[in-house]
């Protein structure tokens, strides 16, 4: 808790130095739930060394191939944030690091993914491929005539429907929709800013025995699915505190699904979880977020 408090203080002063007026900062610690400790294989893998190993140094030369970059995702990395400042985005991007390709931790993560590949069932495959199709894209909702406009809003409310029921829709909860749309704008910005800053190779680009259920046209770190799953889970848990555990469990499942698919390392998921919480800590201090959050909160009373 002491380290979390120091981190919050750093973010406060960093935010102030970037020129954004700080408001509501006295409510942060008592209002936003602290991040849960890493659990299961995420906790175990963190105990291993994440440093380079000279005997496998060739692995550290492997990065995500430039020929696979997607211009659309790169453009999202330079979007205008809704709640965060550009300075905060830069700080968070620089704070994110992944284990060296040659490290003991990465080797253990690749072995873990190989074991998942051997044990995954047809039922698991069906579920993870369903989750793989879920995703909200901010640019689509600028154009109501877009063919995917309605579907995009349905994806925005995926976690709410899973936890609260089918009646949870963007139309019924318009203020919650506004809040989540802005949160997801900043989430997509953060996702691709981190990805293209670090250019981590996908697991199957390091381990030839991995046969992913699909291949992704963007760098591996951090996991975008996991980042959106947790940033929504943490936000929704503040709106509906009685369902916090349900939202967190769903976010955990979404993150783990990317490992079952063979497209992400466990450390991609864990860093995304941490980034999501840090983002919400920073958003909480802005007047814009507080106003939108209060309006959304009123819809759930």
Image (spheres, rainbow, N blue to C red):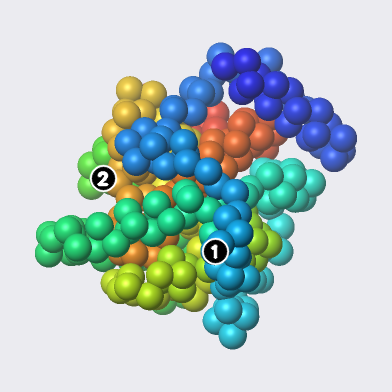
The residue carrying mark 1 is 56
Dividing the image into 4 quarters, which one contains the C terminus?
A: top left
Q: Give residue 191's position: percent from left, percent from top.
A: 57, 57
Where 212 falls versus 295 (above or below)? below
Q: Mark yes or no: residue 98 visible.
A: no
Instruction: Give the label on residue 24, or none.
Output: none
Residue at 54% from the left image edge and 29% from the top image edge? 294
Residue at 60% from the left image edge and 64% from the top image edge? 57
157 left or right of 129 in image: right
Q: Give residue 2's position: percent from left, percent from top.
A: 62, 15
Q: Give residue 170's position: percent from left, percent from top.
A: 39, 50
Where 194 falls versus 1 (above or below)? below
The secondary element bearing badge 2 is classed as helix
Q: Nearer the viewer, residue 4 or 28?
A: 4
Mark positioned earlier in the residue sequence (2 or 1): 1
The residue carrying mark 2 is 162
Residue at 23% from the left image edge and 42% from the top image edge? 165
Question: Farthest residue in the left direction?
Answer: 122
Q: CA distance from mark 2 to mark 1?
A: 44 Å
Residue at 51% from the left image edge and 23% from the top image edge? 34
């Amino acid at each position: 808790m002491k380290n979390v408090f120091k981190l919050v203080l750093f973010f406060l002063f960093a935010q102030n130095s970037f020129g954004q007026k700080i408001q509501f900062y006295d409510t942060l610690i008592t209002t936003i739930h602290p991040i849960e400790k890493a659990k299961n294989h995420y906790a175990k893998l963190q105990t291993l060394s994440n440093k380079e190993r000279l005997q496998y140094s060739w692995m550290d030369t492997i990065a995500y191939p430039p020929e696979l970059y997607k211009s659309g995702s790169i453009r999202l990395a330079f979007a205008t944030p809704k709640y965060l400042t550009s300075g905060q985005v830069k700080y968070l991007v620089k704070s994110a690091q992944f284990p060296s390709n040659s490290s003991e931790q990465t080797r253990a993560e690749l072995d873990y993914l190989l074991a998942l590949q051997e044990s995954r069932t047809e039922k698991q495959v069906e579920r993870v491929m369903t989750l793989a199709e879920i995703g909200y894209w901010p640019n689509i909702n600028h154009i109501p005539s877009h063919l995917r406009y309605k579907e995009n809003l349905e994806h925005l409310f995926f976690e709410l429907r899973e936890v609260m029921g089918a009646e949870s829709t963007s139309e019924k909860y318009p203020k919650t929709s506004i809040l989540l749309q802005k949160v997801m704008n900043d989430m997509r910005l953060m996702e691709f800013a981190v990805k293209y800053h670090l250019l981590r190779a996908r697991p199957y680009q390091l381990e030839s025995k991995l046969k992913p259920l699909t291949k992704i046209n963007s760098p591996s770190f951090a996991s975008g699915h996991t980042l959106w799953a947790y940033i929504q889970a943490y936000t929704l848990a503040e709106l509906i505190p009685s369902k916090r555990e349900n939202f967190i469990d769903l976010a955990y499942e979404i993150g783990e699904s990317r490992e079952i698919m063979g497209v992400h390392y466990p450390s991609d998921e864990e860093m995304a979880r941490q980034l999501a919480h840090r983002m919400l800590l920073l958003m909480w201090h802005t007047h814009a977020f507080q106003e939108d959050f209060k309006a959304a909160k009123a819809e759930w009373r």
